[in-house]
Structure formats: C-alpha cells, structure tokens
Amino acid sequence: MLIFLEEDDEIKDLFKIGKKKKKNERSLAEIALLVENVMAELEVTTKEDAKLNRQGKPTINKLKKLDILTKILSKKHLQLEFLDHGVLTLLKN
C-alpha cells in the first residue's frame, strides 16, 4: 500500500483535469509502466480485501482507490493497454 501512496501523486499529476497533454507526449514505455504500476497496486489491494473478508472485517480498500481508477480507465488512450494487462480479471476479483 505504501507503493501506491507514493505513486498516487504521480498518477494524479498525469491525469489532472485542465492540464491536457497531447496523446503523443507520453511514450508507450511510460504508458506501459503506469499501467503495470496501477495493476500491481490493484492486485495487492484485492488480496488485502480478500484477507479482510476472510477475517469478517469490512473490505473497503478497493473503494478507496475507485476515484483514481475511474479517472485512469476513462482515458481512451489507456483503455486498450489496461485490457491487454487483464484489468477485467482484477476488477472481477
């Protein structure tokens, strides 16, 4: 979870409303790295929620990340990359 907190500001900076960048300003490697980081954090969050669920505790970790995830997945130029990395499987879990 600590990893995501550090990357949280970076992700927010990349997707600030009002600061529109052209799609071609970010390289494919940067986009792939961003997607991999978000997917890794989502996977960790999913495992944490599953553990809490087995303990009978509230599982709200994914809900805390919903705002950022919604903003990222709404970017059309990132959607195919997320689909290629299996975001639907993680969301299902």
Image (cartoon, helix red, strand yellow):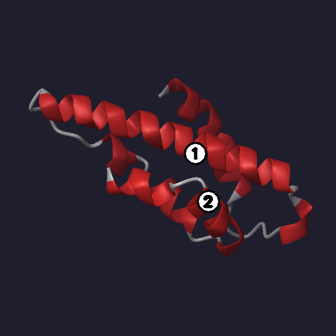
**Residue 40 located left or right of residue 47:** right
- Depth check: give the residue in front, 42 or 10: 42
| Circle 1 or circle 2, nearest the eye | 2
Q: Amino acid at mark 2?
A: Asp
Query: Is residue 5 depicted above or below 34 in this figure?
Result: above
Q: Amino acid at mark 1?
A: Val
**Helix, strand or loop at mark 1:** helix
Mark 2 neighbour class, 10 Å CA radius: few under 14, some 14 to 19, many 20 or more: few
In primary-sequence order, the first of circles 1 and 2 is: 1
- Give the x, y percent position of residue 48: 32, 31
Q: Which mark, residue 23?
A: none
- Quadrant in the picture for residue 7: top right
**Residue 30 located left or right of residue 89:** right
**Residue displayed at 25% across by 35% down:** 50
Q: Which residue is mark 1?
A: 38
Mark 1 neighbour class, 10 Å CA radius: few under 14, some 14 to 19, many 20 or more: many
**Residue displayed at 62% across by 31% down:** 6
- Give the x, y percent position of residue 76: 66, 74
Q: Is residue 60 visible?
A: yes
- Give the x, y percent position of residue 5: 55, 33
C-alpha distance separating marks 1 and 2: 13 Å
**Residue displayed at 83% across by 56% down:** 28
Q: Which residue is mark 2?
A: 84
- Quadrant in the picture for residue 57: top left
Tell me, yes or no, whether the two marked residues, 1 and 2, touch with CB atoms within 8 Å. no
- Give the x, y percent position of residue 14: 73, 54
- Depth check: give the residue in front, 56 or 84: 84
Query: Is residue 63 depicted above or below 77 in this figure?
Result: above
